[in-house]
Image: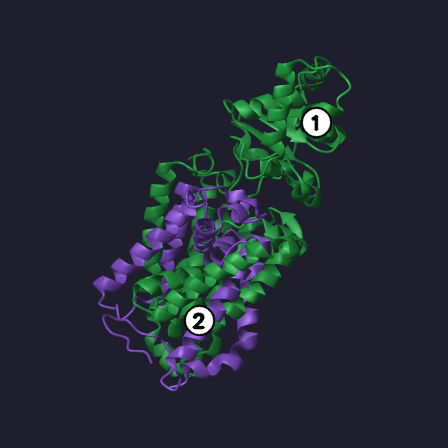
Amino acid sequence: MTTQTGNSYLNPYLAGFLLGITLLASFMILGTGLGASGGLARLSAWCGLCINPEQILNSEYFGKWGAHPLKYYLVFMFAGTLIGGFVSALLNRRISVQVERGTQYSAWKRLILALLGGVIAGFATRLARGCTSGMALTGTALLTTGGVAFLLSTFAGGYLMAYFFRRQWHD
Amino acid sequence: MIETIFSSGSLTTVNAFLVSLVIGVAFGWCLEQAGFGSSRRLAGIFYFRDMAVLKVMFSAVITAMLGLGFALAFGIIRLEAIYIPETILGAQIIGGFLFGIGFMISGWCPGTAAVGAVSGKLDAIVFLIGALLGSYVFNSSYSWIEPWYNWGDMGVSYIYSELGFEFAGFALLVTIVAILAFWVAELIEVRFNFALVAAKSSNLWAFSVVILSGAIMLVALGRVTIPRYRIIETGVYASGVLSQIEKALEHIEPEDLARELLVGQKRIVVADLRSREEFDEWHIPGSVHTPMSSIMQALERYRAFDRIVLVSNGATHPGQAWVVLQGLGFTNVYTMSDGLRGFFERVLKPVSLRMVTLTNSEQAEINLWRTMFLGSGMAVGSASQPSSGSE
């Protein structure tokens, strides 16, 4: 069920061009690319610290980030992403509370798939050291071997399994 | 030449956080404008219904790639001022594959889910919770995954160098591929109705012409080359280098390095030349893994530091690398006497195992070193690159 309200989206090439300019500005000012999953992982570490500080501080991966994992530029970038997305959605009257899915599909099943996909994606970003923003977009724009390889295998994985999950979008 | 926040080593300052926040706002705005606050639109690419992901993604890649190409060609910025994500090929192929499956199943990726969540999409919020759990699971199973995590470590690696291209030529190739992909995407969306695409695509026509001309100009400029560090005309005299060695000015004692790291007044980076496996097993806290073959690229960003200290198990590799770096005009490079073996013997060896009698203050210092360099979660005040897995 999708009820798209509000103004229509920007021309995709123009949106892509502006996104590219944002990435370029990030290279020139920050000296790093864009990123989203890094902020999420830091948040995950912080949640862990709230529950069991001993275990997280001694863990091999999260432990490296110390007792204040949120003091990191990508955490702030993620917060900015939330703000920017919200302002744009608000101004274009595109905010609507819903579970986005095909009309034939139950909301609960869709939420379970969203959770499952989230766990897999969250895990995979740590293995690959980035997500669509930090690896596919930034890495490919810099023409790094890893960035291009990540982009290609992302589409390979998605297309290979897409057939089995098509029903959630059936109307 | 502009300095970036990264190259001036201030990525952990409040200023950097504010800049990141502003860039994040622009990022979120662009994603929302592109319609990426909708999982149906994002998932559309996997069913050839809505190719917006391809169009936006490639337009952004081409824009940033060509823009950076021009900035480098006109000498506005050095490539060393930008943090280049390392290539760990095996991990990134497996990770990418898994990520693609997660992306397809959920219809979200981390950045777009952030935008979806603030647009009121409950599935995006659930995805973000899942991603937090997934990161947590990764941390919990890290010891088991570690070999995969480091599988195929190539350090900083550019796809055009690997394939024997120059930057500009390869950028032109990527641009042509992207333009073809745009037109195919348009055709797919209307089920290959050529007349319809021809009628409505004047914008795409203009965009194609602009990026193609940009890429061709970049090739014509022909000045964007990755420094390959030929040793010529650095103004360094061999006799000067050799006399430094003679006077033993090129090395630092392990105890002195330990003291300087703990005091934290000088800007010091420890460059660890050992293999990735050895580095992961143990390294001096705050040191940077630096593969021998890409040592110049890796250390370029530390030219302004007080000291770059090269370490390995022994002192042979650091000594050889030191000579090469002298030729390239690095004046702040040191090797550590006796290497890491010496560091263990002279800094980290427990008081109880030492043959000589030590004063109380010496004993206290050794105990301090042991807690600081062997204890967990310790961060010595030293610059390191943004930790792996940053994005």
* SS at badge 2: helix
Residue positioned 37% across, 58% down in the render: A17
Residue ID for mark 1:
B350
- Front position among marks 2 and 1: 1
Give the image location of residue B65, x and y in percent. Answer: 47, 52
Give the image location of residue A28, x and y in percent. Answer: 41, 43
Label 2: chain letter: A
What amino acid is labelled 2 in the image? Ala
Q: Dividing the picture into quarters, in which one does residue A114 lie?
A: bottom left
Residue ID for mark 2:
A114
Q: Dividing the picture into quarters, in which one does residue A110 lie?
A: bottom left
Residue positioned 65% across, 49% down in the render: B154
Give the image location of residue A75, x and y in percent. Answer: 40, 49
Please give left or right for residue B81 compared with residue A26 in the image.
right
Shown in purple, the chain is A
Please give left or right for residue B72 compared with residue B125 in the image.
right
Q: Residue furthest right?
A: B355
Q: Nearer the viewer, residue B211 or B108?
A: B108
**Location of residue B41 with respect to B216 vertically, above or below:** below
User: Are tags 2 and 1 found on a single chain?
Assistant: no
Shown in green, the chain is B
Q: Quadrant of the N terminus of chain B?
A: top left
The answer to whether residue B185 of the structure is visible from this angle is no
**Location of residue A32 with respect to B347 vertically, above or below:** below
Q: Residues within 10 Å of mark 2 (few under 14, many from 20)?
A: many
Label 1: chain letter: B
Please give left or right for residue B52 compared with residue B169 in the image.
left
Residue positioned 37% across, 45% down in the render: B20
* SS at badge 1: loop
